[in-house]
Amino acid sequence: MAQVDFHERQLTLKLVYFGPPLSGKTSNLRALHGRVDAAGRGRLMTLDTKDDRTLFFDLLPIFFRTSALSFRIKVYTVPGQPMHEATRRVVLAGADGVVFVADSSPSQVIANRESWEGMQRLLSELGPVPAIVQYNKRDLPDAVDLARCDRFEQPERRLYPASAMTGEGVLATFFGALAASWDHLDGSMRLAQNFGLSRDAFLQAVCAHVGGDERDILTA
Ligand SMILES: Nc1nc2c(ncn2[C@@H]2O[C@H](COP(=O)(O)OP(=O)(O)OP(=O)(O)O)[C@@H](O)[C@H]2O)c(=O)[nH]1
Ligand SMILES: [Mg+2]
């Protein structure tokens, strides 16, 4: 759950990137880090085995202060391999928003579904958290047509296309998850009212910090 300190005007959010093995969760964080690091803030912590599989989790802390508020956004990835179920539970606990990184490869349709169901099982224990869906690896020549991709029980669900390897769509996804987290918390904690900060002003502040393009937040 978010840590919100209205007195100190500090907001701490936790975002978690979840998804099947090798769908590109760590690559999303690397691309995000490439942006944040350019501004000299935020250190990426990853723990991989030698074959690049995430062993425990990755963490990218994005901390900054504006005249209105001090922000702390902690972005995590879970390890996708089946044996790491216990780790996924620990990392997912306390999330304010989730990005489900699905793999666009036709060979991963079932893996996407299994991972989604695993996430729903964990969230049913941990409590409801807004989740948005990214389809990564759009650059694959045989990527499943977006119109035919699994929308996980919500035919109207918005899908965020991305190629984390080149960074395309990574920021739009990140802002989509932040917007969903803000809306979720605003419902219970009245963030906008208590901080005197609108959702758009919040997203613009983060965008300015990570050096993003405002077009990435227009539709968030
Ligand atoms: N073609 C293509 N490959 C990608 C893309 N994003 C990631 N990959 C590749 O997919 C593989 C796995 O990427 P990771 O980011 O390590 O995947 P992960 O989801 O963190 O994997 P686990 O931590 O083991 O669950 C790597 O070889 C990446 O280079 C993409 O957008 N396009
Ligand atoms: Mg990983």
Image (tube, helix red, strand yellow):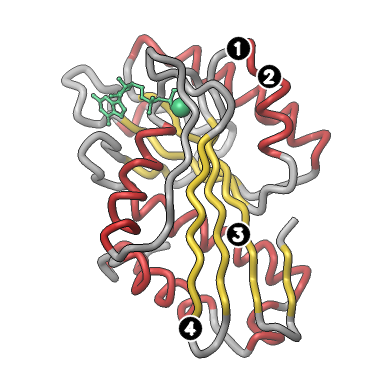
Q: Which residue is mark 2?
A: 85
**Please, what is the three-letter code of the amino acid marked with disc 1?**
Pro
Packing grade of label 1 (10 A; few <14, some 14-19, many >=20) is few
Q: Which residue is mark 3?
A: 181
Provide the secondary structure element on which disc 4 rests.
loop
- Vertical comparison of 43 with 22: above or below: below
Packing grade of label 3 (10 A; few <14, some 14-19, many >=20) is many
Pointers 1 and 4 in contact (CB under 8 A)? no
Tell me where residue 134 sits by quadrant.
top left
Answer with mark 3 or mark 4, whichever residue precedes in sequence: 4
Residue at x-position 67% and y-position 62%: 184
- Distance Cα–Cα, label 2 vs label 4: 38 Å
- Of tags 2 and 4, the one toward the viewer is 4
Pointers 2 and 1 in contact (CB under 8 A)? yes
Q: Nearer the viewer, residue 46 or 186?
A: 46
Q: Position of residue 66 (x, y in %)?
A: 48, 83
**Please, what is the three-letter code of the amino acid marked with disc 3?**
Ser
Q: Position of residue 167 (x, y in %)?
A: 25, 44
Q: Which residue is mark 1?
A: 82
Looking at the rendering, in which quadrant would you find the C terminus?
bottom left
- Vertical comparison of 2 with 192: above or below: above
- Distance Cα–Cα, label 2 vs label 1: 6 Å
Answer with mark 3 or mark 1, whichever residue precedes in sequence: 1
Q: Which residue is mark 4?
A: 66
Provide the secondary structure element on which disc 2 rests.
helix
